[in-house]
Each structure stands twice: as structure tokens, then as C-alpha cells.
Image (tube, rainbow, N blue to C red):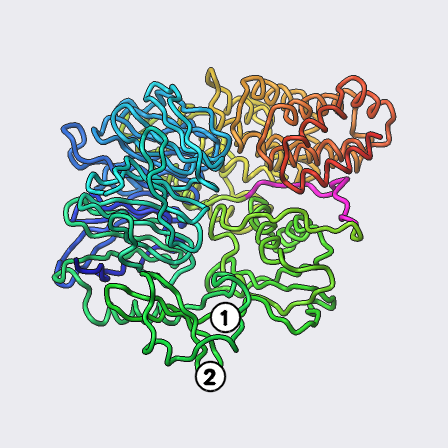
Amino acid sequence: MDEYKLSASLSGHEDDVRAVAFPTSKGVISASRDGTVRTWKLLSDHPPMYDATISSNATSFVNTVAYLPPNPQFTEGLVISGGQDTVIEVRQPSKGPEDNAEALLLGHGHNVCALDVDPAGKFIVSGSWDSEARIWPVGKWECETVLRGHQGSVWAVLALDSETILTGCADKSIRVFHKSGKLLRTMTGSEDVVRALCRVPKRNPSGADFASAGNDNMVRLWMMSGVQRAVLPGHENFIYSLASAPTGEIFSAGEDRTVRIWKGLECVQTITHPAISVWGVAVCPENGDIVTGASDRMVRVFTRTPERVADAETTRQFEDSVKESSIPQQAMGGEVNKEKLPGAEFLTQKSGTKEGQVQMIRENNGSVTAHQWSAGQQQWISVGTVVDAVGSSGKKVDYMGKEYDYVFDVDIEDGKPALKLPYNLSQNPYEAAQKFIADNELPITYLDQVANFITTNTQAATIGQSQEPISAPDPWGSDNRYRPGGDTSTPSTPIPKILPQKDYLSILVARVPAIQKKILELNQALIAGGQKDVSLNPSETTTLASLCKHLESTPKIPIPAGGLDLAMKLVTAWPYKDRLPGLDLLRLLAVSADLASYSHSRSGSIVNILVFASTASDPPNENHVMMAVRGFANLFATIEGRELAVGSFNEIQTLITNSLATGTTNRNLLVAISTLYINFAVLFVSEPDEASFEQVIALFDTLGKILEKQNDSEAVYRAFVATGTLLTLKDGEIKSAAKDVYQLGVVVQKALGKASDPRIKNVGREIAALLS
């Protein structure tokens, strides 16, 4: 059988391509961290040429995409996408971002990372970081069933047939559900996080029903009974995506830069990409071609049909880009001993032993190159140059007049200089990460990724060991690429104190242009639906453009004329279901003193407006409430805002108490609440005269409930920081009440017992000392 060769390289995305679909031979679909979903229409076969159209513009990263084939109701089919904004968008392929979506599916409380459509096209199944999967009937567009029981993020979903759904989870398990929501079976046997699922073709000799893959680098073939029929080794890092073809092949893509093609139980071809990760792979059911999406922002099509192979120049550019790739030593198993490597003559004298085998070669100029064995071509193919990840000069690195064990180069944005991240091995990684984020005014949501990056890249180092600066092209290119290696402190090195927290936290990360487009899209829907009385007029759309431009630049300067009135209209006059983007704008504006001072003749202060706008439904939408709580947290950026927050404490506390009473597991909402409580704690400790006994006790009461019932590490960590900061108040009566009435010591110990995050353990020890 012929090998796959490049058919087309499609450029246009501005960030990692996280997911792809290949519904027909006439086009492909891609979803990206740049917030867009793009459809690529085939214009010509000889050579293959595609034309791209932006189908959707989300408010943040898009992580997953699926396709519903045409049916009598939807003759074009439907493109389904989801991502960081928790909204699943359903859209006809021919429509653009300015047109109405067919549906916006709301219900997940965190990042939507997996989508699938059942073979009959009757329902969509989704998976999320909120530890849930959901079933959405096509045409009804409301969640019919929530699949619960997972102990971590649901990274993969597979609608095996019209009655059976499989889920792959961060807890290393695969679960089999009936469509009704009944858990039929839990399968264990994977050694790490399960990230991908696909059907196994009937022609596969294993007789297996489906395949799984994930962080243990293995493709595993399973029977529905739970019996594991085969394990396919070969990948050298996480596997992110699986697909299968009617002709019998299975395709896997992952962090080792490769797509591997499996025929039967053997890897028959390895396609290396000039990227850090190959995030997605999909197969065209009509012709067997495949499409990939990678971290280099490229979409690529590969084919086994000679007529669809790319022209010579396109092929040469792809091969050259692979050869010119830089491969960190960590990806090759650690430090490389050049003296023991063979020279270039090895490549002509020795054959590989298996498809995809990698051999390092010492070149005459002293560099080290990597070569991969192609069983089909019976030759070694150059796949890049191995570069030093960490130097070994034994010298400290000078940065800004101080010496550090490490100074990392971190590329945040293309075309801009790398940011410097200094770090000493005696530091707590999270303290260093928090300072890096504060110094560079980065979103607080980067905290875990930066800290995990530090931990991963210093795992083998010990205090006193010095290193040269190292370059990290994209430390947060993956939601879970780098994993903590545990507490890096030693008994002889005191962990830096975390308590009390002294700085207010704001929640300002947002994709403002996408919010603007979403508002305009909803506005068109209002006009089309005959609701011109509440829709935006041309003058208001101009004001919206001015307001969004303001938010992208300097949100603390006076808000543009008319901006506040426009925002109030979006969150009070618009239908409740359409208020989310308006609430998003309003929480961004909350850092302005103008908003804190705003008062409406009927609605009252901004706190009153946020409470009303977010809860005007029974039950309230948790994402609406989450935006309101983010707005309350952002008020602490100004003196006026802090005064308003304290004066409105009862209204804010009532909203939060009601939200928690529902047993919510909405991670974004819980993090927002914990962040708000940190800000109240910072204010009460820095200005003790502002702290009433009743308010502090109310905070302790609610924080105790979060610590007792919630498991999300970020929400629990922030709740711990708020709790510990409040315990530094010099008021013996408050501390006694916390210990004796609210049994805070017991609650803290229980929370510590179920925590694995080193940050939680560190701050927990400080709280225990404060309670002693």
C-alpha cells in the first residue's frame, strides 16, 4: 500500500490548531486557540488548493470541533465547536460569524474539550474540564442528560452507537454510559490520563471495538466487555487524538510531533511535523485522506493518491521545515553524550529495526541531528537538530543585578521579544510564577501553567546547581502538557510564606473582539426576531466599537461617552439568555472608578445591577452569575470600588450563598468566588477598621463550605489563601469563632487530606500554624 504524502499545507490560523474534521472530500474544518473555526473548501485537485472561510469567532480558545452530516432538516450539515468560553456553538457551514448561529448550547461549567455526534445524527455528546459529559438532542438544543461520576476532566467522548457513549477521563478511566445516563461499566488499565477515543475498524485483526490513548504514550485496543486486546507502543510522548478509516487503519497524533499510521497491530508509517505538538488528526470517509492540526498553526492534508499529492515546491518546503526543526534534549530522553553517537556514515550502513525508530547522529560540525527510519522508503529521514535544553557551565545567571539558577525565555506573543522568567531552586515555583505574572501584567489564569513549566524544567536539579538560560518556546501550549513533579523545597530550605495575601486580584483575561462580534451577532438575531425596541441602533454599535477599543487598551482611564449606558442596556434590557457577553463587558469595566461611582435612578449601584442582571431567571444561569462575581472581584482595583463592595456586602453575600446552595461544581464560578473572598480578606487585613465581626464570620462560614465540598485545586487553593489571610487579623474573638464555632481546623485538615497540589499543602501548613 502507498504511503501518505503531503497533499496541501493550509495557513491562516494565528495560534495552535487544536482540532480538525474531514467530513467530505470537498473540504476540511479546523478549530484553533485563535478563537476561530475555519472551513476550508477544496477549489482544485491538481494541485490541491483550498479557500478558507472563518465560520465562527469565539470569545477564547476553541479546543474541539465535530460535524453533523446533512439531513432533511439541516441540508448543509452542521459545524459544532466548543472551547474555553464553555459555550458549544452549532452553525451551518455556509454562515459566517456575523450570521446567527443555529444554537448556543449552555450548561458546562468549564472548558469544553471534546465533542462527537452519534452515527445516526440524533444527538451531540460533549466533554469538559468540569468532570461532566452531556448529551444534546439535535434540534432540541437543550441538555437532555448529564453523564456524571468522573473524577477529573472528561478529555474524550465517543458516541459508539445510538444508545452507547464512551468517555475518557483524567482519572485514567474509560466509562461506558447508556444514553439515559446510567453508568454501565468503568474500564481501568490505562496508566495515565485518557485523552482520545475512536472506533476500531471491523477489519482490525484484534477484534476490538474501540481504541484509547493518552498520557501513557500507548494506543490501547478494547472490547466493550472491558477486555484489553492489544497495546500499540511507538509514540514517545502524550497522544492527543485518534481516528480510524473504513479501510482498517488507525491514526494517532501527539506531543512527539508525529502522526502514526497503524495497520493491524503494526505502525506502518510515521509522519513527523515541524511543530511541538500534533493536536488533531481526522480521516475523510470518502477517500481515506487525512488532515492534521498542529502547534505551528498549520492545517495539513495528506493523501495516498498520487493525483492529489502536493506540487514539488510545497513538498520541499514541508520536508525542509521538518529537517530544520529544533528538538530539545528532553524530547530525546535527556542529556546527550555526543562522544558515543555514531557519525553520518551510520545512515548509509545501518537500517532501522522498526517504523518510526529515531537515531541521533554526530555531525562533522559538532551538532547532533535526529533521523527517523521509514520502513516504507527503507531509508533514514532527517527530522531536526537536537539542541541543548539546559547548559552545564556551573555558573549562576545574572538578571537585573541578581543571580539566578535559571532565567527562562518565554515567548508569549509572536513578533514580540521573549519575556524573562528568573528562578532560583530555593523558591516556591508558584511564588515565582505569581511574580512573573504580576511583573508582566499577564492573566492570572496562566499561574498553573507557568508554575508547572518551572517544576517540569527543574525536576532533576538540586539547590546549588547552576544552569545557563534556557529557551521555552511555548510553556502553556498545552492545557496539561507539563505536570508538577512535587514540592521542590528541601528540609534545609524554608518555603516562602504565602500568608497573608497583600495584593488584590482582578480577573481581566478576555478576547474583546470576539465579545464584540458575539454582541453584534445576537443583535442581528434580535432584529430578525422583531425585537428592534431593544436592539442596538447604528449609534450604539459605534459606541460599542469605541468601548471595545477602550477595553483592549487602557481600561482604567475614563470610560468612553455612552459606554456605561450601552453596557447597562445589554445586561438589563436584552433577553436574559443573551446577556452573557454584556455581563462580560461589564465585569471588565468594573476596574474603573467610573463604574463604581455609577448609580441608576431605578436599578441602583453596579452591584445591584449585576445581581439583577445575572439572576433574572429561575434558576439563574451559572455562567451569568460567574460574570457578576468576577465583576465584584474587579471592583477592588479602585478605592471607590472597594468602598462599594464593602457597603454592598450583604447583597453580594446573598448571591453567593444562593449559588453555592445549589451544589454547583462550576469551576469558573467557584474560582471567581474564592478570588472575591481573597480581595475581601486583603481589604479587611490592610484596613482593619473596615472589617466587621459579622462580615468576617460570614466569609469564614462560606469558605469552610467551599473547602469541605469542592475538589477543584484552584478554587480550593484560593479559598485557603482567603481563609489564611483572614486568620492574620489581630482579633482573638474572630479566631476563636473560626476555630470553635466553625471548626475551621477540622475543615482545613479534611481539605488537605484530599489535596495533591503542593500549593495547597504549603498554605495549609501556614493555616495550621495560625490556628495553633
503 sits to left or right of 49: right
Query: Disc 1 designates what residue?
Result: 387
Residue 131 horizontal/vertical position (percent)? 47, 31
The amino acid pointed to by label 2 is Asn
Foreground residue, 7 or 520? Answer: 7
Task: Mark 2: give few (<14), some (14-19) or many (20+) Cα within 10 Å.
Answer: few
Q: Which of 451 and 369 is in front in this view?
A: 369
Residues at marks 1 and 2, CA–CA distance in whole angstroms: 14 Å
Name the mark on residue 365: 2
Measuring 50% from the left and 33% from the top, which residue is drawn there?
152
Counting from the top left corner in percent of width and height, residue 499 is at: 76, 40
Is residue 500 magenta-colored? Answer: yes
Amino acid residing under circle 1? Val
* Label 1 packing within 10 angstroms: few (<14), some (14-19), many (20+): some
Magenta-tinted stretch: 494-508
Residue 675, image x, y percentages? 63, 35
The image shows residue 18 at horizontal and vertical percentages of 37, 48
The reply to whether residue 370 is visible in this rendering is yes
